[in-house]
Image (cartoon, helix red, strand yellow):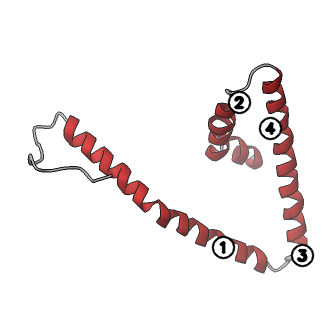
Amino acid sequence: MFAMSVSLLNPHAIIDTVGVIGISSLSYTGIEKMTFTAATILISWIWYFSLAIVGKKVGDIDTDGRFINEINKVSAIMIWIVAIYSIPTIQNVVGLLTAFLVNYSVSPRRPPSNWRPFKF
């Protein structure tokens, strides 16, 4: 039950399936769409079975958990790098939202006439 909930209720898996694979399939028709579907299913099965096999082998070799600990550290560093790299994009989005809300707000407060949103 836990495995089903993790896989079926995983938002990344749903977004990946619908948003990426689903939208990618729109460019195909007829036999190409059937081939794309079959290839997607086949590659997905190969990927997840490979993950299971590698996970089992790593678990057999790394009985004390050192290797997994190192993988977790590398993963954390990668996440921090992506987060830092994303800061300018987040600032741009906040600037756009701020400009939109200020310019199209029904609030009686208006910015000074010389105020300009972030330069993009």
Residue 17: x, y in percent? 69, 38
Query: Element under label 4?
Result: helix
Instruction: Report which quarter residue 21 is drawn in.
Output: top right
Spatial CA span between label 4 and label 2: 10 Å
* Residue type, mark 4 in image: Thr
Mark 2 and mark 1 residues within 8 Å of each other at the beta carbon:
no
Q: Is residue 95 above or below residue 80?
A: above
* Mark with earlier residue (3, 1): 3
Find disc 1 in the rendering and name its residue. 74
Spatial CA span between label 3 and label 4: 31 Å
Q: Residues within 10 Å of mark 2 (few under 14, many from 20)?
A: some
Instruction: Report which quarter residue 33 is drawn in.
Output: top right
Query: Element under label 1?
Result: helix
Query: Element under label 2?
Result: helix
Question: Which label belongs to residue 61?
Answer: 3
Query: Which marked residue is nearer to the observer: mark 2 or mark 3?
Result: 2
Mark 4 and mark 2 residues within 8 Å of each other at the beta carbon:
yes
Residue at (40%, 55%) from the top-left corner? 90
Question: Which label belongs to residue 40?
Answer: 4
Query: Which marked residue is nearer to the observer: mark 2 or mark 1?
Result: 2
Q: Nearer the viewer, residue 28 or 60?
A: 28
Query: Which marked residue is nearer to the observer: mark 3 or mark 1?
Result: 1
Q: Is residue 101 above or below residue 78?
A: above
Residue 5: x, y in percent? 70, 44
* Residue type, mark 2 in image: Ser
Q: Residues within 10 Å of mark 1 (few under 14, many from 20)?
A: few
* Mark with earlier residue (1, 4): 4
* Residue type, mark 1 in image: Val
Find disc 2 in the rendering and name its residue. 25
Q: Residues within 10 Å of mark 3 (few under 14, many from 20)?
A: few
